Image (cartoon, rainbow, N blue to C red):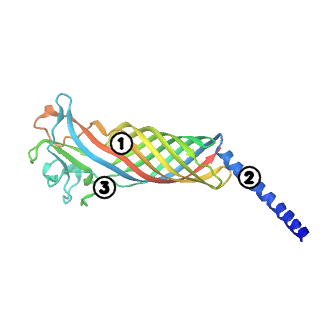
Amino acid sequence: MKCKITKIAIIMLGLLLPFQAFSASLVSDASDSHTKSVSLSASYKLSTPFFNHFLIRETNLTSGIIANKRVLGLKNDILINADEAIKNLSNFDFSEDYVPKYKNSLYGLSFLFGYSFKNLKVELEGLYESFDVRDTKNHIIDNNYRYFALSKQDNLNSDYVTLINNGVKLYSVILNICYDFIGKNTSLTPFLCVGIGEDIINIFDAVRFKPAFHAKMGFNYRISERAFLFMDMYYHKIIGNQYSSISVKYPKVLVFPSTRSSVLAELDIGYLGSEVGIRIFI
């Protein structure tokens, strides 16, 4: 009986040794893929905006802030296009102030260059997001919802200037520091990243630069020795909310032409999203 047990043990040991060697190889390969490796990545992103505290005011080089009585959007039922409609203040809606709302970004992209050393990874990330403005009033004429006016008085005889809102476009360059939680599961690797960088912001047809904070958490899924799929959730926040010296349009001759001005806009910009992409170690 003891002899049979010994033979069975020897056979099982012989079968297990190659499996153990294969498992050790996988762990070694996974570790090697995260050790002193250069990686290239690309991802597709979906994001939801958290834009708050909208405020917009005229400014003048000599007198500073100009007090606007009203911020007005075009009426939704007018049947002429915006180029003509903005020439008459009566085409603007005095029933409530204009407050823009923004759509989700459905076509965000990200490209990353990374360098890994054991569990740590440094990434240089370039990303693009676009949040178009929403038509909350169902305007009859397309794109009329994009136009609004700043009126100095709460009446139809007031001087006013106009602007166009084509949404918010963000081009970001972020330096991320990431930590990969490499464990016994060689296929699935959780990670956490934090980063800082600079955003190029297109807002009200003006381009401005702002610092930004970026954080993300997700996981890598190993599909080959050098290739990983990754999924994560992220939060992006622009530091600072003022956008100065924005140009305005003068749809009619001003009563007081000396008060030609620009605009100071305030908007807190942040967004939450998810992405899926592929990372190749080279």
**Which numbered tag is attached to residue 202?**
1
Q: Which residue is drawn at 77% across and 59% down?
A: 19
Query: Badge 1 local density, few (<14 within 10 Å), some, or many (20+)?
Result: some
Residue where numbered disc 2 is placed: 24
Query: Gap between marks 3 and 2, in whole Å?
Result: 55 Å
Front tag of 3 and 2: 2
**Residue 165 shows in the view:** no
Given the image, on which type of amino acid does mark 2 rest?
Ala
Q: Name the residue under label 3.
A: 134
Amino acid tagged 1: Asn
**Residue 184 point in image, percent of width and height:** 65, 54
| Residue at left offset 89%, top offset 68% | 2
Instruction: Residue at the far bottom: name it.
Output: 1
Q: Earlier in the sequence, mark 3 or mark 2?
A: 2
In what element is the residue under mark 1?
Answer: strand
In the image, 38 versus 105, the foreground residue is 38
Q: For the residues marked 2 and 1, what is the alpha-carbon distance in whole angstroms?
A: 51 Å
Label 3 element class: loop
Residue 21: give x, y in percent of width and height: 78, 54
Which residue is situated farthest in the front direction here? 2
Crowding at mark 3 (Cα within 10 Å: few <14, some 14-19, many 20+)? some
Could you say which is closer to the camera, residue 50 or residue 41?
50
